[in-house]
Amino acid sequence: MAKSSWTPDSWKARKAAQAVQYDDAGELEAAVGTLAQLPPLVTSFEIEKLRSFLADAQEGRRFVLQGGDCAESIAECRPGPIAAKLKILLQMSMVLIHAGKRPVVRIGRFAGQYAKPRSQPTETREGTTLPSYFGDLVNRPGFDPNSRRADPWLLVEGYKHAGLTLNFIRSLVEGGFADLHHPEYWDLSFLESATLSPALRQEYETIVGEVSNALRFMQALGEREVSELTRVEFFTSHEGLNLWYESALVRRVPRREGHYDLSTHMPWIGERTRQLDGAHVELFRGIRNPVGVKVSNKAAPKEVLELIETLNPDDEPGKIVLITRMGAGAVRDGLPPLIEAVKASGRRVLWMTDPMHGNTISTEKGIKTRDFDAIVSELEGAMAVHEAQGTYFGGVHFELTGDDVTECVGGADGLTEDDLTKNYATLCDPRLNYRQALEMTFRIAKRIRPAF
């Protein structure tokens, strides 16, 4: 299909993987119509700024840290959980800035990560089969027919809670919560309540002191560039899974060409929905936002090139983010052919790694978990491949939380399968807890430090 034939509704003529089956077309139309009349959640100015930052990251001048919940919960739209996610991303970014000596772009999986793809459309418990839980944007986690019914008005509820989340995040950032002049304030109760190892605690506190002293010294010298470093910004992202939600927020804006998806700064297309002739690629090829694409070792180089060309025909900088998710055992063999193909094409992309999704396992008791060492192994494998290929390893994508959950095994705190039931709180996939996320960041920092 030619680019000129694109409209915000042209996706409806394509097959949509992971499509939601709503049972009342009139109710769906009413909910989407309501959503289409509501104000945007983000602005084109913010989106364009992120694109410029990602263009820098493509050239190795910035590093991207993307992280947050597997699936946001409307019930968790509260100050504590939101602030906790900001804190851990701030702390992780501080370590990466110190190691890489370059600015870090912070992109949260929040304010819209309410929809999740599922391996099976239905779930069976004790002989009862119901639709799977597809996230709070679609249905509810309770296992009963009413909860699992796809409710179109949850599209509006998700929008409202995304707006509340964004409002709180912006208030915190504008109010000095994230001031790099005072990173010692970011901890609040973290270092006192979390059971960090003494070595990890000391390493982080040393970095905080060094960065604080460096900033104060630069400011005393009248260094103008310090203002950019100290101005912390957060951008939002979520998987653009529910196309009724996304397309209702695709808008034109005054004094700019094209359309923007104003539900988020950077939507991404998942591994299960990146079909070249599918509805998701069709919708997102027509927007001005940067677009992420999850890519596993199952993707052929030719297919990846066609995706890049379809989503970014003019090869605009900062537009395409390839987020590889291959698993610890596949990354060293699966990643090189993709990098080689993109290099040969001359196309500009930002390479990131999601080491979470390719390393999900189930225990003997049927509990989904991820092993810390496997996550580290995929990260180190991806970084080694990029070093060998002479390409920029541009960022990381984690499912994490600022809370002390017990969902991933391993790490310095030594969680085992027997510990998983202590605080297994995720609605879908297992997340790194606070200690594991910070430890993971130090692993990355030690690897990227010699490169700068």
Image (cartoon, rainbow, N blue to C red):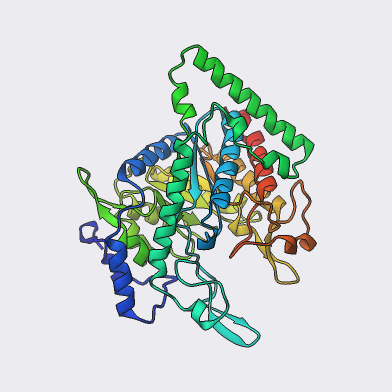
User: In the image, is residue 45 above or below residue 33?
Assistant: above
Side of 139 where 97 appears, left or right: right
Q: In this orientation, which residue lies closer to the viewer: 20 or 24?
A: 24
Q: Position of residue 371 (x, y in %)?
A: 70, 56
Residue 362, image x, y percentages: 69, 67
Horizontal side of residue 382 vs 11, given as left or right: right
> Where the C terminus falls, by quadrant?
top right
Q: Residue 154 occupies which quadrant of the picture?
A: bottom left
Residue at the image position 31 percent from the left and 45 percent from the top: 44
Q: From the viewer's perspective, tell me whether residue 253 is left or right of residue 227.
A: left
Outermost residue on the top side: it is 221
Using the rendered image of the protein, determine whether residue 398 is visible from the camera's viewpoint. Answer: no
* Residue 16 x, y percent position in the rendering: 38, 70
For the point 44% across and 34% down, which residue is it?
59
When asked about the image quadrant of residue 208, the answer is top right
Quadrant holding the N terminus: bottom left
For this orientation, the residue located farthest to the bottom is: 127
Q: How many marks?
A: 0
The foreground one among 143 and 268 is 143
Q: Residue sitting at 76 percent across and 71 percent down? A: 364
Viewer-closest of 221 and 385: 221
Say if residue 66 shows up in the picture.
yes
- Please provide percent x and percent y for residue 273: 44, 65
The residue shown at (41%, 64%) is 157
Locate residue 290 relative to residue 215 in the image: left or right.
Answer: left
